[in-house]
């Protein structure tokens, strides 16, 4: 396959895959599943889905790139315990723990299939696996992980701090200062002179009046 970077899997994993996965013979598409001799992982664009977020009881559309060398594709969905989960719709046959699809039209360059997620709420992540079957009982493996959407609620505490700044206030008090007018109690010089001049005359008149009154009475 063009663009592949062959990375052979360990022998122990190949034996395990040989027991669990098999593909139809490329020449006659017989009903018998055969054991893979080699499985290579690829870093080229591989299996894709319409969403990478896992949700239970949901139908996912899956696409796998194919070319003239690919005779069929085996699709699997496993949980974190490597147990197969869900179901594949419209598969041509079941190959042990995988669902096999024949490549019938290589001109599309993509094989499309639908996977139905289980109703179980205990599953939080699923890995979709695609084994593209090549001649000589070899295959390439590509995978895609679906993770549950985790909603994180962030509580933002808004603390309103009231800052009171004490600003000195200058109070200007207008004090009206009234200078008391000091009344002069002392007689002026002119008044004193006038009183000094009139004093003997008043005394003389008083004496005269007193004399006349005494004469009239006696």
Image (cartoon, rainbow, N blue to C red):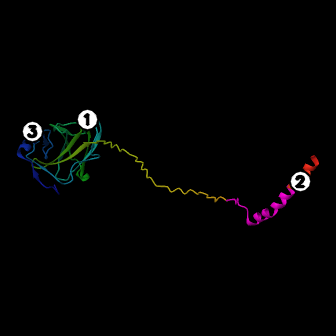
Give SS at disc 3: helix
User: Which residue was labeled with disc 2?
Assistant: 209
Q: Quick check: is 59 in the magenta stretch? A: no
**Residue 152 placement: quadrant:** top left
Which circle's residue, 1 or 2, is located before the other in the chain?
1
Number of residue marks? 3
Q: Quadrant of the N terminus?
A: bottom left
The crowd level at tag 3 (other Cα within 10 Å; few <14, some 14-19, many 20+) is some
Please give the residue where the numbered disc 3 appears in the rendered image: 19
Horizontal and vertical percent position of residue 120:
25, 33
Q: Position of residue 183 (x, y in %)?
A: 69, 59
Label 3 – label 1 distance at C-alpha: 25 Å
Of 149 and 92, nearer the camera is 149
Looking at the image, residue 3 sits to the left or right of residue 116; the answer is left
Please tell me whether mark 3 or mark 1 is closer to you in this view. Answer: 1
Q: What numbered label is drawn on residue 118? A: 1
Whether residue 167 is situated above or below residue 27 in the rendered picture:
below
- Closest to the camera, between mark 1 and mark 2, is 2
Residue furthest to the left? 11
Position of residue 72 in the picture relative to residue 19 (left or right): right
């Amino acid at each position: 396959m063009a663009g592949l970077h062959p990375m052979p899997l360990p022998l122990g994993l190949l034996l395990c895959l040989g027991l669990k996965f098999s593909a139809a013979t490329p020449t006659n598409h017989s009903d018998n599943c055969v054991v893979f001799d080699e499985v290579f992982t690829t870093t080229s664009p591989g299996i894709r889905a319409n969403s990478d977020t896992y949700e239970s009881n949901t139908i996912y559309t899956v696409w796998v790139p194919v070319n003239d060398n690919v005779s069929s594709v085996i699709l699997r969905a496993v949980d974190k315990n490597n147990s197969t989960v869900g179901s594949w719709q419209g598969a041509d046959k079941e190959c042990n723990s995988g669902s096999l699809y024949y490549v019938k039209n290589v001109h599309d360059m993509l094989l499309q299939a639908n996977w139905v997620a289980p109703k179980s709420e205990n599953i939080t992540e699923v890995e979709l696996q695609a084994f593209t079957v090549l001649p000589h009982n070899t295959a390439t493996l590509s995978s895609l992980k679906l993770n549950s959407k985790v909603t994180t609620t962030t509580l933002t505490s808004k603390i309103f701090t009231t800052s009171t700044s004490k600003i000195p206030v200058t109070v200007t008090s207008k004090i009206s200062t009234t200078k008391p007018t000091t009344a002069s109690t002392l007689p002026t010089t002119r008044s004193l002179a006038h009183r000094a001049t009139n004093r003997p005359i008043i005394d003389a008149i008083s004496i005269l009046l007193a004399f006349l009154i005494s004469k009239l009475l006696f």
